[in-house]
Image (tube, helix red, strand yellow):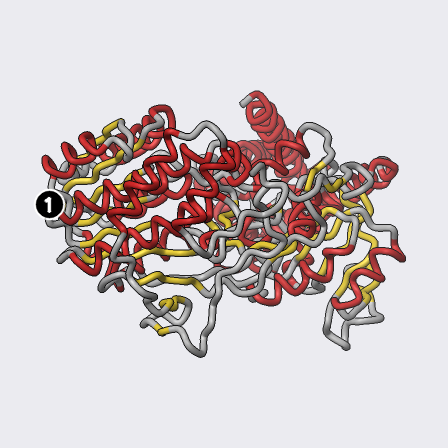
């Protein structure tokens, strides 16, 4: 706020200076115009000077007022063009007319041609003066920039067009800008080898790594506004091996108005190295509008975003259910504020605390509110922690899912959607095995119930609680090092809004027991993700922040599997969503849940894992996983 006040004050001081200069200039120009027609002796004789003096004073006083009214002083801060010059001419003519009206009441008027000459001289002076002031300001700023050149960051700008010109101008005019642009890089062969704003243009963009190495640049700014998402990811891949900070201008779709000149950091969507998955949720809105919807795990990363997107569909009742009160309270306050601000009194927001493994509590809620749809996001998902506490993973991920599915059947819920994970495919850890167990539960109830059940299986979520992105960011803020388990490890990633849109869309497609799988594109190497996050923070990997390997954690895989088989899996109306063919239904599910409950009686984690493996035959207990 202080900085804003300081800037405003400086702006007002400049206006005051311009006004004083215009007063003196208008007075002097008018007097000179009359002196050119009268000899000094004749000018003084017979009081001939009275009318010109009154005229000149009136012109001098009126000029800054008219300039303020018509915002002429704002023109000074821009590039003067033909339209600005015409505007100044017309405004100056108006000032002369006002002056003429003022002295029409004064006797001994000079000749009318004197005023015409005065007006022409004033116009010419102002039209040439304003660009002169602009040039002086530019030279002053450029001198300031050159004097502080030792503090500059060597920068490469990708793109040599109108957007890049904005970046160049900002670096030259703003003394607080620390970028010294040394090279422009473009794919246009007509530009390569030439100069852009007196800066050499190199290319093509695919050679950016070599150009960075040659120029010793420390930062790269991507300045192409009409860039496609695919091309942006290609450029980011070119830069993946470069130890530079990467920033970019907004793409056209991201611009906050026609004059958006922000230079922004690479965001989480950019880190995906693929186009974001856009899902049309129009039909989802129709499905949930005016209905009662319940979200378990509503305070978590996925659950809270589910709640936000479901809120946008205007359900009649939205039930937030979670065991953790703090985050649930946060999302409750967020939605309460929205209800107040949007004056939306049609949505009943219900926030309840409790655990899904408490069957009585789940039944109380489902029986009372009779939800039409349940989105079950409550789960323990942290792989290493669940290796040490397998009984708790079974309690929440298995028994909790069973309780919710059972009550959905008992009280006639239309659909229940389970949030699953890619770790449920041939699981090597407790978390994955319990989520696979949860999938078999919804498939079992789908086989015997009128309620339609489904599971949604996807990979890691960027920015979610417990994911690598928040961990890496904390490590970077602490000065490093950033820790990864293995440099070869890869994962499928998606953003939280993508994951939630997928869950809602699959709820629409759910017809009974399906496991929906998202085409998430190519997987991301975790080490690449770590390097990009370091550059995003304006630091250089292995120079400012080191990256070290710690070894695979218990139950962790090098490669996660979604088992996306586009040839044999069923397609949906959305080309990014597939359905895994239904496997044999576990008709002994009820008995298996009873057996799984015996895990609470065991003291040794190895015994609990063996019990789990006997129920989920695809679960492989890996060596070193604390059997």
Taking the spot 29% from the left edge, 44% from the top edge, the residue there is 593
Which residue is at a point 87% across and 51% down the rendered structure image? 216
Residue 536 spot, x, y in % from top left: 66, 44
Residue behind mark 1? 411
In front: 40, or 550?
A: 550
User: Image quadrant of residue 522?
Assistant: bottom right
User: Would you say 436 lies left or right of 544 here?
Assistant: left
Q: Nearer the viewer, residue 343 or 9?
A: 343
Sort mark 1 into few (<14), some (14-19) or many (20+) by Cα contacts within 10 Å: some
x and y, in percent, of residue 377 in the image: 34, 43
Q: Residue at x 61, y 49 (%)?
A: 266
x then y, percent, for residue 165: 69, 57
In this picture, is 172 found above or below 277? above
Q: Is residue 360 above or below residue 232?
A: above
What's the residue at 57%, 44% (across, down)?
555
Q: Is residue 611 left or right of residue 540?
A: left
Instruction: Specify whether residue 55 is in view.
Output: no
Give the image location of residue 234, x and y in percent.
Answer: 65, 65
Q: Quadrant of the C terminus?
A: top right
Is residue 375 found left or right of 300 in the rendered image? left
* Residue 109 to residue 232: above or below: above
């Amino acid at each position: 706020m202080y900085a804003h006040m300081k800037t405003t004050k400086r702006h007002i001081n400049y206006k005051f200076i311009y006004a004083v200069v215009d007063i003196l200039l208008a007075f002097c120009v008018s007097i000179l115009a009359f002196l050119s027609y009268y000899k000094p002796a004749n000018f003084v004789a017979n009081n001939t000077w009275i009318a010109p003096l009154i005229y000149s004073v009136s012109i001098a006083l009126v000029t800054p007022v008219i300039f303020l009214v018509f915002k002429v002083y704002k023109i000074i801060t821009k590039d003067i063009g033909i339209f600005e010059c015409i505007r100044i001419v017309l405004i100056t003519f108006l000032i002369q007319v006002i002056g003429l009206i003022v002295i029409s009441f004064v006797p001994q008027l000079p000749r009318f041609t004197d005023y015409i000459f005065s007006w022409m001289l004033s116009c010419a002076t102002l039209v040439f003066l304003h660009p002169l002031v602009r040039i002086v300001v530019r030279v002053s700023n450029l001198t300031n920039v050159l004097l502080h050149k030792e503090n500059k960051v060597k920068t490469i700008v990708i793109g040599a067009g109108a957007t890049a010109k904005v970046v160049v101008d900002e670096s030259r005019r703003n003394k607080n800008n620390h970028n010294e642009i040394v090279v422009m890089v473009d794919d246009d062969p007509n530009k390569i080898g030439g100069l852009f704003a007196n800066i050499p243009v190199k290319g093509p963009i695919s050679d950016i790594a070599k150009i960075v190495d040659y120029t010793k640049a420390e930062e790269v700014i991507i300045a192409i506004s009409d860039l496609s998402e695919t091309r942006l990811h290609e450029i980011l891949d070119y830069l993946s091996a470069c130890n530079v900070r990467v920033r970019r201008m907004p793409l056209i779709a991201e611009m906050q108005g026609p004059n958006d000149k922000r230079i922004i950091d690479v965001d989480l969507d950019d880190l995906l190295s693929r186009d974001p998955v856009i899902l049309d949720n129009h039909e989802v809105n129709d499905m949930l509008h005016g209905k009662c919807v319940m979200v378990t795990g509503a305070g978590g990363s996925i659950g809270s975003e589910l709640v936000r997107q479901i809120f946008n569909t205007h359900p009649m009742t939205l039930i937030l259910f979670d065991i953790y009160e703090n985050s649930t309270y946060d999302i409750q306050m967020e939605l309460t504020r929205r209800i107040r601000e949007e004056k939306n009194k049609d949505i009943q927001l219900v926030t309840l605390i409790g655990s899904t493994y408490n069957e009585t509590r789940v039944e109380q809620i489902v029986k009372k509110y009779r939800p039409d749809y349940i989105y079950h996001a409550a789960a323990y998902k942290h792989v290493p922690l669940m290796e040490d506490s397998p009984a708790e993973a079974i309690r929440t991920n298995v028994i909790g899912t069973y309780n919710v599915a059972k009550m959905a059947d008992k009280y006639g819920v239309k659909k229940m959607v389970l949030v699953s994970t890619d770790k449920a495919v041939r699981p090597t850890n407790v978390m994955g095995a319990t989520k696979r167990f949860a999938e078999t539960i919804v498939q079992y109830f789908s086989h015997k119930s009128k309620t339609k059940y489904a599971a949604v299986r996807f990979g890691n979520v960027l920015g979610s609680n417990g994911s690598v992105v928040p961990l890496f960011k904390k490590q970077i803020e602490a000065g490093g090092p950033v820790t990864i388990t293995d440099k070869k490890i890869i994962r499928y990633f998606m953003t939280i809004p993508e994951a939630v849109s997928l869950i809602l869309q699959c709820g629409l497609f759910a017809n009974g027991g399906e496991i929906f799988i998202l085409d998430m594109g190519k997987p991301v190497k975790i080490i690449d993700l770590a390097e990009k996050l370091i550059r995003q923070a304006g630091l250089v990997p292995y120079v400012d922040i080191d990256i070290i390997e710690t070894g695979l954690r218990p139950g962790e895989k090098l490669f996660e599997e979604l088992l996306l088989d586009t040839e044999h899996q069923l397609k949906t109306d959305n080309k990014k969503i597939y359905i895994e063919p239904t496997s044999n239904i576990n008709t002994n599910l009820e008995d298996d849940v009873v057996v799984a409950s015996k895990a609470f009686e065991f003291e040794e984690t190895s015994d609990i894992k063996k019990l789990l493996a006997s129920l989920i035959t695809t679960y492989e207990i890996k060596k070193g996983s604390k059997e």
